[in-house]
Amino acid sequence: MKEISDFRVQLDVEEIPKKWYNLAADLPRPVPPPLNPGTKEPVTKEELGLIFPPSIIAQEMSTERYIDIPDEIRENYILINRPSPLQRATRLEKMLKTPAKIFFKREDLSPVGSHKANSALAQAYYNRHDGITNLTTETGAGQWGAALALACNIFEMECTVFMVRVSYDQKPFRRTVMETYGATVHSSPSAVTEYGRLLQKTMPDTSGSLGMAISEAVEIAAKNPDTMYALGSVANHVMLHQTVIGQETMMQLKKIDVEPDYMIGCVGGGSNFAGFTFPMMGEKIKGKNNCEFIAAEPKAAPSITEGKYEYDHGDTAGMTPLFKMYTLGHNFVPSSIHAGGLRYHGMAPLVSAAVDQGYARAVSYDQLETFDAGLLFARAQGVIPAPESTHAIKAAIDLALEAKKKNEEKVIVFNLSGHGLLDLGGYERYLAGAMQPSGKNGA
């Protein structure tokens, strides 16, 4: 590896990827298909058509290695600041006194503050192309809801968001962002759906969960012919759309003649980890690199490190198909940690398959550890990371300190999936010493 002096590695607009990459084409063993919960047979296109439009279903079920990105989506990727820079964390390296080289991909520079717009733009585009005028969705901490609200505004669609109650209360300005873009936002469980009203009656004090919010959004989509459901993570087509991140990262590393030893992403449902690592992982499957891929998850929702690899529903009410994934059980309700985007009971089938087949591994952290890492990163690099992203930062710091102990010049690359400027309430609690460990309701 040659000496690296560049503070940032930039790409030109013309270098925005022209295709999405599908890991399903290269995994040695096929990803088990989603099942109809009643018949236990593979779900058909007709069944998926209740909540997804034809274009999205085609991508969801595809095993093609590459899928063309329409020009209109690529043009809108420029609006969300693609291509995003790859930056070297030189000050963090010095603070840690490590021989490791640390890089981070800047997905925090999107107008909505996270990677989520990469898929939101694609899903809104395809739904509009297929004649849909309304989208409904769930959101945890609000990053996905904000991204879909922006995308629906761009493609002149209506957007309804069910936001997990704890994040609805913790992060009011994310709600304001969604409403600024024209979305309607409900605290979940809500009084808007039959399932929401049932939860309000049977679990009046619940903090909510992504599984509950998904159930509400799916109910609305299934009952209204002009409305479809847009999913922020977990599904194959969402993993696909996010691979613009990893493809750009590979081009940037090639520009400076660097090969990563580790690539790290935080995981809740799995979309930013998949988008960041899958293109490089596909090359590893072909024997072209020896990179390790690490998924950093919260101890409050440790689906990979403590869950089982089995078929389970993607939502709490059991309205979705059964997915083969690492899961804590669809009735699992995580504690109220500030990394709301990671409070999910299951892991994406493609990410789960990659772990099961030995191409990725997971680590889990308590939120006190991750906020400590986030604070160190902010003071080193000047960037306040989202609570979700601090999990990847914690993993990167641990590896850098391990390299220091062994005096090894490792290359560590992580995805900074979002900024924390709308999560300052969490940082305020941490700085005041008022934050609780993940297992104690995590507030």
Image (cartoon, helix red, strand yellow):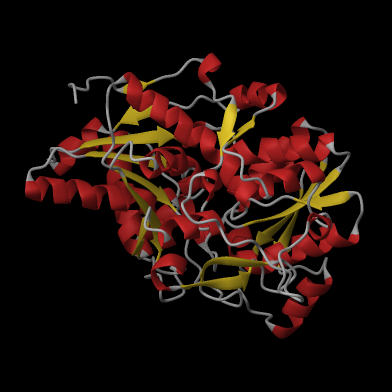
Q: Position of residue 349 (x, y in %)?
A: 55, 59
Determine the residue positioned at 38% across, 66% down: 434
Q: Position of residue 81 (x, y in %)?
A: 55, 25
Left-right relation of 199 to 353: right
Determine the residue positioned at 39% across, 44% down: 285
The answer to whether residue 10 is above or below residue 360 is above
Farthest residue toward the bottom?
Answer: 202
Q: Is residue 177 visible?
A: no
Q: How many marks?
A: 0
State which quadrant residue 332 falls in. bottom right
Along the viewing direction, whichever of 109 and 246 lies nearer the viewer: 246
Left-right relation of 223 to 393: right
Along the viewing direction, whichever of 400 and 429 lies nearer the viewer: 400
Q: Image quadrant for the N terminus? A: top left
State which quadrant residue 18 falls in. top right
Determine the residue positioned at 22% across, 33% down: 91
Q: Is residue 414 visible?
A: yes
Q: Position of residue 230 (x, y in %)?
A: 72, 50
Q: Position of residue 96 (x, y in %)?
A: 16, 43
Along the viewing direction, whichever of 350 and 16 lies nearer the viewer: 350
Determine the residue positioned at 55% across, 32% down: 110
The answer to whether residue 82 is above or below residue 278 is above
The answer to whether residue 319 is above or below residue 291 is below
